[in-house]
Amino acid sequence: MQLNQITLPSTDVARSCAFFSALGFTQIVSNLPNYARFECADGGSTFSLHRVDSGAPGAGIVVYFECDDVDALYRRLVAQGVEFDSAPADQTWLWREAYLRDPDGHVLCLYHAGENRRNPPWRIGSARS
């Protein structure tokens, strides 16, 4: 199996469409005001937005979008007025991460892990450990 689609609840799908379009994702389905789907530029994964009537529960949920150059993307988005919770920073688990929230408050992480995403030095059963 391969995870390639996630759906986020949204109280205003059109507003969230504008946000995710500004982040650089390609909208491939529009059924406003109830639904929209986006395609990631790399890897063929998709995610969608589904309208809900009230604030979406989501405590603890983080959606990760990997990119080659977190710092360049961060600078471009900040220049466009996108607000971040934290600037890019190297983590002890060998990922470089920056955090922001979508208009419904979902936590998003823009990151680069490269080979360390699937094969960190401490991977179970790894010759690297």
Image (spheres, rainbow, N blue to C red):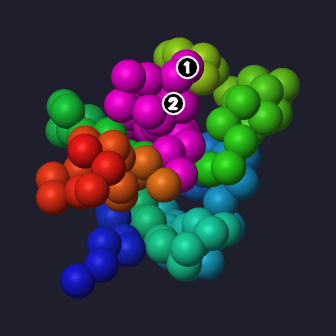
Residue linked to disc 2 = 97
Q: Quadrant of residue 38?
A: bottom right
Q: Residue furthest front?
A: 127
Using the rendered image of the protein, determine whether residue 97 is visible from the camera's viewpoint.
yes
Say whether residue 104 is magenta: yes
* Residues under numbered marks 1 and 2 in contact, where contact means CB atoms less than 8 Å apart: yes
The C terminus, quarter of image: top left
The amino acid marked with disc number 2 is: Glu
> Compared to 63, does 76 lie above or below?
above
In front here: 121 or 29? 121
Q: Position of residue 52 (x, y in %)?
A: 28, 52
Task: Locate residue 44 relative to residue 18 in the image: left or right.
Answer: left
Residue in the picture at 79% in, 27% down: 75
Residue linked to disc 1 = 89
Say whether residue 31 is magenta: no
Residue in the picture at 66% in, 37% down: 70
**Label 2: which secondary element:** strand
Q: Position of residue 50 (x, y in %)?
A: 35, 62
The amino acid marked with disc number 1 is: Ala
Q: Residue furthest bottom?
A: 1
Which callout, 1 or 2, points at the residue further toward the start of the chain? 1
Q: Residue furthest top?
A: 86
Using the rendered image of the protein, determine whether residue 51 is visible from the camera's viewpoint.
no
Q: Position of residue 41 (x, y in %)?
A: 66, 68
Q: CA distance from mark 1 to mark 2?
A: 5 Å
- The span shown in magenta is 89-114
Q: Residues within 10 Å of mark 2 (few under 14, many from 20)?
A: many
Residue in the picture at 44% in, 66% down: 47
The N terminus, quarter of image: bottom left
